[in-house]
């Protein structure tokens, strides 16, 4: 039986297809090897709450110069390498408190200073609700680190920010529209507003 010879144009096309496939494989392999390791973050107790989904989808790819990284659990996010900001959606909603509260772009945040906390340096927020420094992939301990929790939104969102690495004003302003996807039912009030409340 005579051997069939493929036309030159078809042979050239087949060679180009194989070369393109090989190039794609090499590029994919290089991009996967260039990725940094996922940040280990414990999920919040209500991370599976459906209200967290729209918020997480709307999270920005960058906060200032800090890029979004992959995390190990649902409804969490981390920015910076090493991490400067850790976010968890689905934490318990704070009740009435005398802790400082700030409002940025319509979102109320209750603030706690973790700078003097004795938490170990880990990116994984603890199950007790007190979160350590966000530099879990670094070796130093807490430094200018703050825990912020949304007030008046259920489920609440928690942020741990190392302000020595990124401005808290930048973070809060940039993520406000995403966090606002969880509806607000209460708001922070100041001393002057408390004084105007009915007695008893």
Image (cartoon, rainbow, N blue to C red):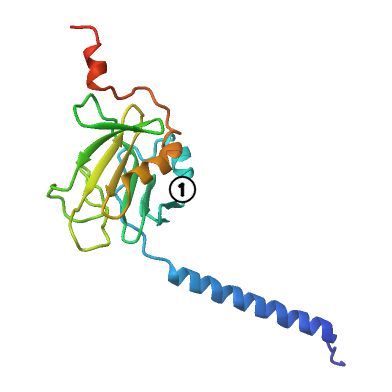
- The N terminus is located in which quarter? bottom right
> Dot 1: what SS?
loop
- Say above or below: 149 vs 29: above
Closer to the camera, 94 or 170?
A: 170
* Residue 114 spot, x, y in % from top left: 18, 45
Closer to the camera, 191 or 7?
A: 191
47 displayed left or right of 98: right
- The C terminus is located in which quarter? top left
| Residue drawn at x 27%, y 53% as measured from the top left | 134
Q: Residue placed farthest to the front in the image?
A: 192
* Residue 58 spot, x, y in % from top left: 48, 43
| Residue drawn at x 23%, y 24% as measured from the top left | 96
Closer to the camera, 154 or 5?
A: 154
* Residue 68 spot, x, y in % from top left: 42, 54
Q: Quadrant of residue 33?
A: bottom left
Q: Residue placed farthest to the bottom in the image?
A: 2
Q: Bin the neighbour count of mark 1 within 10 Å (Cα to Cα): few under 14, some 14-19, many 20 and up.
A: some
Q: Quadrant of residue 157?
A: top left
6 displayed left or right of 110: right
* Residue 185 spot, x, y in % from top left: 37, 22
- Say above or below: 179 vs 65: above
Q: How many marks?
A: 1
Closer to the camera, 31 or 98?
A: 98
Q: Quadrant of residue 113?
A: top left
- Say above or below: 24 vs 2: above
- Say above or below: 150 vs 36: above
| Residue drawn at x 44%, y 70% as measured from the top left | 34
Q: Disc 1 marks which residue? A: 60
| Residue drawn at x 21%, y 50% as measured from the top left | 144
């Amino acid at each position: 039986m005579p051997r069939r010879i493929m036309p030159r144009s078809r042979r050239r096309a087949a060679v180009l297809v194989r070369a393109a496939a090989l190039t794609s494989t090499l590029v994919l392999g290089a991009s996967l090897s260039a990725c940094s390791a996922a940040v280990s973050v414990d999920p919040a107790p209500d991370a599976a709450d459906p209200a967290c989904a729209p918020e997480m989808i709307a999270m920005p790819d960058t906060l200032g110069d800090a890029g979004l990284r992959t995390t190990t659990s649902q409804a969490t996010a981390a920015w910076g390498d090493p991490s400067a900001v850790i976010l968890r959606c689905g934490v318990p909603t704070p009740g009435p408190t005398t802790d400082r509260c700030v409002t940025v772009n319509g979102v109320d945040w209750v603030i706690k200073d973790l700078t003097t906390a004795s938490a170990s340096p880990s990116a994984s927020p603890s199950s007790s609700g007190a979160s350590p420094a966000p530099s879990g992939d670094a070796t130093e301990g807490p430094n200018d680190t703050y825990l912020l929790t949304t007030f008046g939104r259920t489920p609440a969102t928690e942020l741990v920010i190392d302000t020595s690495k990124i401005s808290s004003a930048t973070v809060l302003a940039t993520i406000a529209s995403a966090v606002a996807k969880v509806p607000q039912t209460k708001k922070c009030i100041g001393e002057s507003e408390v004084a105007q409340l009915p007695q008893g």
